[in-house]
């Protein structure tokens, strides 16, 4: 993984240094002896390479120096300026020379990217741990989504069933109301009919003379509610009262009754108690 960032930076640096040296020798060689132009080109490349090496040493130690970084960028800008000036003054292929004038700045940018990669690089163990955490989070999210979808489908099914059941109840109630209405109408017609009234009068006089029948329709409507007294539960027997009743039933015959016979007579007498309390009372009195 480290080679993915360092190799492009090294290649770009080498190309830019060779290009800078060639341009300086060709451009300044016409105005001064070529050895002097070669020294100038090597000076630019050497200063750039020296500052780059020092920056890499500081980065390996986890340190950073702004002055060294500024000097390195100054050499890169100087090399780029030389290339741009040569491209602007060249008589032939000025566009081609100008197109490669950005190589020194690009090389510095690649080394900057490589330094950022080194500062943020993680060990394989840490990367595996991060991948495991991410996979666990994705699994939990998928399970939560599946649970929500299942709950939504279940709720939809339940609502559909309730709605259909309500519709069936409504249809049954409507048919019942229609039937009752028809029956009521028939009864009303029969009561109001003249022939039916005379027939009922003749039947009633045959059973009870001098009595004119008064046929009222059956009541169809809300009935009277039950009183609170009729809904009260029978008070439970206390343990003492239960013991007395159980003992009286058990000793009502000689020899004393068994538990099964006593329980049957206890229920037959109208008393009420749970099986647990009744058996506990039997144990206490027996």
Image (tube, helix red, strand yellow):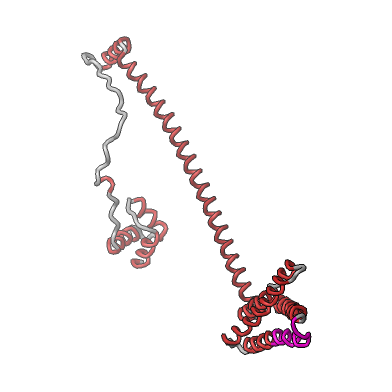
Q: Give the range drawn in magenta.
A: 31-46
Residue 286 appears at what percent x and percent y?
Answer: 36, 66
Expressed as whole percent of the image width and height from the top left, the position of residue 129 reads 62, 76
* Left or right: 9 as drawn, with respect to 138: right
**Residue 189 left/right relative to 89:** left
Instruction: Judge whether residue 8 is colored magenta.
Output: no
Note whether residue 61 is visible: yes
Q: Inspect the magenta stretch and tell me whether residue 44 lies in it.
A: yes
Establish if 85 lies above or below 166.
below
- Asked whether the viewer can see residue 7, the reply is no
Closer to the camera, 30 or 198?
30
Depth check: 99 or 26 in front? Answer: 26
Identify the residue at image location x=42%, y=30%.
Answer: 174
Residue placed most toward the observer, 231 or 112: 112
Q: Position of residue 253 (x, y in %)?
A: 35, 58
> What secondary structure predominates along the stretch shown in magenta?
helix
Q: Where is residue 216 in the image (x, y as percent from the top left)?
A: 27, 22
Rendered view: 206 above or below 129: above
């Amino acid at each position: 993984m480290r080679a993915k960032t360092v190799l492009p930076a090294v290649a770009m640096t080498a190309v830019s240094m060779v290009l800078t040296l060639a341009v300086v020798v060709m451009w300044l060689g016409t105005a001064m002896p070529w050895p002097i132009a070669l020294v100038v080109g090597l000076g630019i490349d050497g200063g750039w390479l020296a500052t780059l090496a020092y920056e890499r040493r500081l980065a390996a130690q986890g340190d950073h120096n702004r002055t060294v970084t500024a000097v390195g960028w100054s050499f890169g800008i100087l090399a780029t300026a030389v290339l741009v000036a040569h491209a602007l003054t060249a008589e032939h292929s000025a566009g081609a020379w100008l197109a490669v004038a950005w190589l020194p700045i690009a090389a510095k940018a690649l080394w900057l990217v490589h330094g950022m990669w080194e500062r943020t690089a993680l060990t394989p163990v840490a990367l595996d741990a991060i991948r495991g955490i991410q996979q666990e989070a994705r699994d939990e999210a998928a399970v939560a989504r599946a649970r929500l979808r299942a709950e939504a489908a279940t709720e939809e099914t339940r609502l559909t069933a309730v709605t259909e059941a309500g519709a069936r109840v409504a249809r049954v109630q409507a048919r019942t109301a229609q039937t009752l209405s028809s029956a009521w109408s028939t009864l009303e017609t029969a009561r109001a009919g003249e022939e039916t009234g005379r027939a009922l009068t003749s039947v009633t006089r045959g059973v009870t003379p001098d009595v004119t029948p008064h046929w009222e329709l059956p009541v169809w409507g809300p009935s009277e509610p039950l009183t609170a007294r009729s809904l009260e539960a029978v008070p439970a027997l206390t343990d003492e009262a239960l013991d007395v009743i159980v003992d009286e039933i058990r000793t009502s015959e000689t020899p004393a009754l068994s538990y099964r016979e006593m329980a049957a007579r206890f229920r037959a007498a109208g008393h009420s108690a749970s099986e647990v309390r009744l058996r506990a009372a039997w144990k206490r009195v027996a």
